[in-house]
Image (cartoon, rainbow, N blue to C red):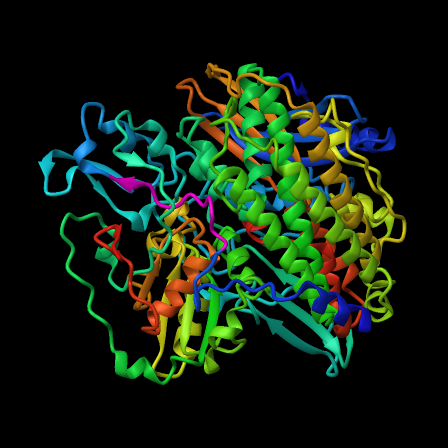
Amino acid sequence: MPQWTLLGLLQGKQTAPWPLAEGTDGQADFLGMPRYRPELCGDGCEACAEACPTKAITTRPESGPTGRLNVDYGRCVVCQLCTEACPNGAMATSSDWAFGVRRREDLVWQKDATPAPVADADRRRAFRRSLHVRHVDAGSCNGCESELQALNNPFYNLHRLGIFFTASPRFADLLLVTGPVTQAMLSPLRATYEAMAEPRWVLAVGTCAVSGGIAEGGYASGHGLDGIIPVDVYLPGCPPNPAAIIHALLMFLNRAPQRARGGQLVE
Amino acid sequence: MMSAQTTAVQAGELIDAASELISSGGRMQMAYAWYLRKDELELRYVASTAAQAPFTVWRCGANGSVPSLANTSPLLSWYEREITDLFGFKFDGQPQSQRLVLHTGANPIRPPLALDYPNDVPIRIDRTKQALPDVAVDEADVQLLPFGPVRADVLESAEFLFFYIGEAILHFHPRLFFKHRGMEKRFEHLSPDPGVVLAERVSGVGSVAHALAYCQAVEAASNCVVPPRARFLRLLLAEMERLYNHLHYFGHLCHTTTLKVGEAEGKLLEERAKQLNTRLTGSRFLRSVLAVGGLRRDLAPQGWLHEELDKLHDAFARYAKHMESTASHLDRLITTGKLDRRTAFDQGATGPVERASGIDRDLRRDHPYAAYQEIPPLVAVREAGDAHARAQVRMAEVNASIALIQCALDMMPAGAVRADCAIMPNSEGLGWAESPRGTLFYAVHIGADSKLARVKVKSPSFSNWRVFPFTVHDSNMMDYAINEASFGLTIAGCDR
């Protein structure tokens, strides 16, 4: 057993300084949500809407306040097909991943977005340094689980932020849900939520949980969490990377600002 | 079909044909159904005869009575039950009549994969109708522990029923398909190109294997030849996927044997591998790269990946040496969850699980695709069939994967990465990949409109979940988590 202690010690500190200090968050080169630039929209604008497999991009009959397109990042599965299809660069690759938002409408592209209100800060104050999270997989592809499991690896080391996964919903403050909510998971999900003591909150992780994603609808699947249980934070991504999940958790605790508004990252 | 030889077999001849196949050293691989025409359901059986020989596909009309092959080739039982649930077609003499994919309590207006099943009508499930499996234990001392579908920790959803006395497990029954999303039906009416995005999202940690098997199936249907550089890059991507999956496996295995630093080290190495994935493709899961006909864009692994893998290799060698010399860890693995060769073969074990039980099979070597003809892998086989053997096979595979990638980097040809693929209407193709967890098949049927008419997905975990309970019956509670981790199963791929 001493050999393991030595192996661990010899490696030194492996944890990323982010988000507590300046330094790498481990997401260099990550391709995030494509950025919409309506001023570049020109002829052939339908191409990116046609390429989108989840109807995150739809065309409008005439150019309106959001340009020629409606872009809903709550439906985006980050497949990058639109960036290849668009002839004008109006949908361009980006590294934008911090898309956790308090209101669903903040994921829809808008020219002038109103600042999101800080939600019930007083009620959450007690949980700022000790949050217990219960995860429920409501039919994900296991991509989101892979990233959630990564949160406890030495690089992200979620524990240091005072955030813990807990086995029982009775001990949980926050329900973290992945997947589009399959028909078979509908009642176990509701039962888990009902088992939680108040105050209780819900975080939808991944585009499936936000809107149904690629697996939306059909005979066995669902349309995400809306209409099933109330959602406090939406985080789209396919899957969202571990840093995005950490940002969404800190944002929920009012320890980090919401960065996405009107479908764009603002500082 | 270039990749497979299709022959018609009458329903009355099926049992004899299957017996003959098995006695001559072949093995059934999967079965599925599809609508040849409206109201004309056809069954397909895919079998392997020998290494380097094309797969054999039997076609058999599903009209009238078709015998179950479950007693000849037990692994087919789950496929038959799936066809019964999704198409409403029953097999004569199927020994297990319970539902598999659809839960009891689900009452669809008609079978969900019927062509006229209406769009977006969900099948509601009445959970009060859930019945216990028919297990012949009614002793007063036997207790039932239902565990799931929401389990401890961050895990995929499934329910496990343990019938036990004290520490001893008498019977184990996994109830899966809570995560069934109906993915196969979603492919229908899509163009083949966007189908790749869907295939990448059937099983997240198998994104490359799924997309690759899917693309190869479409390419086989269209007689499309992929450029050499794309074939080499496909091999590279597939092995990068194996790397991070296997590293995760060791982290999780150490977690179950409570080797804390071992757990941290495995998960740290997995994180490093995922960050290499991002540097290579922009995606931690290597998504958005594969396309029908090759790759969507060229990649630039030269000049840095070789060196990074050397570092990872050194770190893994040190880690593996520690694991293999820690008595408390090995004590929990050796003799745990023993799977004998016969059960592994009959029940359809695949990937590292079957290779740890002495079955020397690997699609990369036996039915080469991508660039595996040029760079065949070293296939590791162990005989013991226990959790330790399953871990050792994966250890050898980590080393083999790194060698394959570095070899591919050295031999990487220049040139285009995508060929134009003209989709042929009314065609079909079979594609496969040796995913980190074993044999993965995609059977693709393209309709008269050049759209996807039927896509069957056979994931390795569908096979290994069928096998896993055989190693749990008559074992004990203390070993359960270790045994489950040693199988390295996913649920998303199985449930689809």
Q: Is residue B157 something that shows in the picture?
A: no
Q: Magenta residues?
A: A26-36
Residue placed at 33% from the left, 60% from the top?
A100
x and y percentages locating residue A24 in the rendered image:
48, 56
Image position of B235 (left or right of A91): right
Which of these two is toward me, B324 or A183?
A: B324
Residue placed at 45% from the left, 32% from the top?
B195
The part of the image, by quadrant, that contains residue B75 is: top right
Residue placed at 69% from the left, 48% from the top?
B312
Residue placed at 75% from the left, 72% from the top?
A5
The quadrant the N terminus of chain B occupies is: top right
x and y percentages locating residue A75 in the rendered image:
32, 47
Which of these two is toward me, A168 or A247?
A: A247
Q: Is residue B33 something that shows in the picture?
A: yes
x and y percentages locating residue B182 in the rendered image:
47, 45
Query: Taking B407 as reference, is A129 above or below it?
Result: below
x and y percentages locating residue B189 in the rendered image:
39, 30
The part of the image, by quadrant, that contains residue B232 is: top right
Residue B169 magenta-highlighted: no
Magenta stretch, main secondary structure, is: loop
Query: Taking B226 as reference, is B344 above or below it?
Result: below
Which of these two is toward me, B422 or B471?
A: B422
Image position of B301 (left or right of A217): right
Residue A29 magenta-highlighted: yes
The part of the image, by quadrant, that contains residue B238 is: top right
Which of these two is toward me, B367 or B82?
A: B367
Q: How many marks?
A: 0
